[in-house]
Image: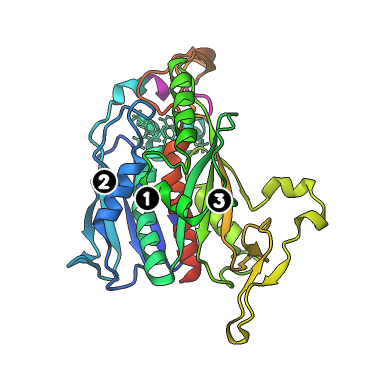
């Protein structure tokens, strides 16, 4: 099954954007683990986005847990969570049955499923499916924090080609990183957040959309998680993160800029940071490797960037094809779309990382 991930912490996502519901079955939650539903619901609300700069579709995203949860604790058997789809406007999608949106999955979905795919709202390809991903992700984050003292933070480091002045995790303090949780959008810097909002409002006014980059940091991870050759931390995290629609790139540490550096600039020098012989602590002086060597965590924070493309559904007329007539045509999109996916993709990205990491740890 393709919509399933993990060996020990197993996540199986189902549903379509305009079907009755979407949901997730999660296996591997330790029996007796107390799931904080308030934290889970707060996370779900953050994924919904912000009025004016996100889709106008208004779903409650209330999480209904129907199995594997009893007396506020996980039973250890599969946990199933369901989220209703209520505010659907499927009429907007009628023309997309045959006229495919550039850069959405209308064409590939049609070919793959012989025209039987549910094209309404993007069906199973929709960003809506990141809601159940966030249910599993938030539970994974709660387990990582409580049982392993690992915390995951993500924020927006770039929107379009703007240098917003948002600090990177490489220079931010822990207090600054923690402050992301109290912001209405995932930023450290309020000023950067306002610049981003202004940019998104501008592209929205023009009927256009814009992409962005998310920086993620995994803090508190011990040395030794992940293994060669195919179960590397990078490989597992990347696979999970590409489950988030519109993600087009991921790089760890210095990433692609490593290809432009010399070893003398790049190499992360190992360093004892104390002289307590019984409990020597090792760090590296720099973190160009993003906390990973040989696919294994080296004890430094795992840091990676995720590139999110601009929303495919824009209101500017676009050239495309009509599969029923066999002719080229022009498409004018209707309906409600996010002018920038990146502000909402932050939470699915954190979720995917948490799911992949917990699976490796277990
Ligand atoms: C949270 C989220 C919201 C999204 N909102 C929209 C949207 O409103 N309109 C749209 O065309 N695509 C949206 N997308 C992106 C599409 O789902 C995605 O581009 C499409 O499924 C094709 O997948 P690909 O871009 O990975 O190739 C969203 C994605 C995410 C993660
Ligand atoms: C509903 C959500 O996002 C949707 C993701 C999406 C897409 O094509 O990915 C297209 C839009 O769907 P609709 O046209 O039905 O409003 C977004 O609103 C959600 O994230 O909960």
State how far apart marks 2 and 1 are (Cα). Answer: 11 Å
Q: Local crowd at mark 1 within 10 Å, few (<14), some, or many (≥20)?
A: many
Q: Local crowd at mark 3 within 10 Å, few (<14), some, or many (≥20)?
A: many
Depth order, front residue of 48/100: 48
Element on which disc 3 rests:
loop
Q: Position of residue 306 (x, y in %)?
A: 56, 44
Magenta segment boundaries in residue numbering: 95-103
Q: Where is residue 156 in the image (x, y as percent from the top left)?
A: 50, 40
349 shown above or below 280: above
76 shown above or below 331: below
* Pointer 1 or 3: first along the chain: 1
Left or right, residue 291 beside residue 336: right
Q: Which residue is drawn at 52% across and 50% down?
A: 216
Question: From the image, which quarter does the N terminus lie in?
Answer: bottom left
Q: Do the CB atoms of the residues marked 3 and 2 lie less than 8 Å apart?
A: no
Q: Where is residue 118 in the image (x, y as percent from the top left)?
A: 37, 34
* Residue for badge 2: 83
* Residue for badge 3: 169
Question: From the image, which quarter does the C terminus lie in?
Answer: bottom left
Q: Can residue 1 be seen in this view?
A: no
Quarter of the figure with residue 71: bottom left
Q: Point out the frontmost of discs 3 and 2.
A: 3
Q: Do the CB atoms of the residues marked 1 and 3 lie less than 8 Å apart?
A: no
State how far apart marks 3 and 2 are (Cα). Answer: 33 Å
Label number found at residue 134: 1
């Amino acid at each position: 099954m393709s919509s399933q991930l993990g060996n020990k912490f197993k996540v199986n996502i189902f549903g379509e954007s305009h079907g009755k519901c979407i949901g997730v079955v999660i296996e591997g939650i330790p029996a007796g683990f107390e799931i904080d539903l308030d934290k889970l619901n707060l996370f779900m609300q953050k994924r919904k986005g912000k009025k004016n700069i996100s889709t106008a579709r208004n779903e409650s995203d209330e999480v209904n847990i129907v199995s594997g949860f009893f007396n506020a604790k996980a039973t250890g058997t599969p946990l199933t969570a369901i989220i209703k789809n209520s505010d659907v406007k499927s009429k907007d999608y009628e023309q997309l049955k045959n006229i495919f949106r550039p850069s959405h999955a209308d064409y590939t979905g049609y070919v793959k499923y012989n025209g039987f795919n549910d094209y309404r709202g993007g069906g199973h390809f929709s960003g809506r499916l990141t809601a159940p991903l966030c249910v599993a992700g938030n539970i994974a984050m709660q387990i990582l924090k409580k049982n392993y003292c690992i915390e995951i933070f993500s924020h927006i480091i770039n929107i379009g080609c703007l240098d917003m002045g948002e600090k990177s995790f490489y220079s931010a303090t822990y207090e600054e990183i923690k402050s992301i949780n109290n912001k209405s959008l995932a930023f450290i810097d309020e000023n950067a957040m306002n610049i981003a909002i202004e940019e998104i409002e501008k592209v929205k006014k023009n009927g256009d959309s814009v992409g962005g980059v998310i920086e993620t940091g995994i803090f508190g991870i011990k040395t030794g998680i992940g293994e060669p050759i195919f179960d590397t931390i990078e490989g597992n995290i990347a696979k999970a993160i590409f489950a988030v629609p519109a993600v087009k790139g991921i790089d760890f540490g210095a990433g692609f800029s490593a290809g432009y550096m010399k070893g003398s600039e790049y190499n992360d020098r190992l360093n004892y940071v104390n002289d307590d012989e019984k409990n020597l602590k090792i760090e590296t002086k720099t973190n160009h490797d993003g906390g990973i060597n040989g696919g294994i965590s080296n004890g430094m924070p795992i840091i990676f960037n995720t590139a999110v493309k601009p929303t495919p559904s824009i209101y500017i007329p676009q050239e495309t094809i009509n599969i029923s007539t066999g002719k080229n045509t022009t498409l004018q999109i209707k309906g409600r779309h996010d002018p920038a996916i990146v502000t909402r993709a932050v939470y699915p990205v954190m979720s995917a990382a948490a799911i992949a990491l917990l699976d490796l740890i277990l």
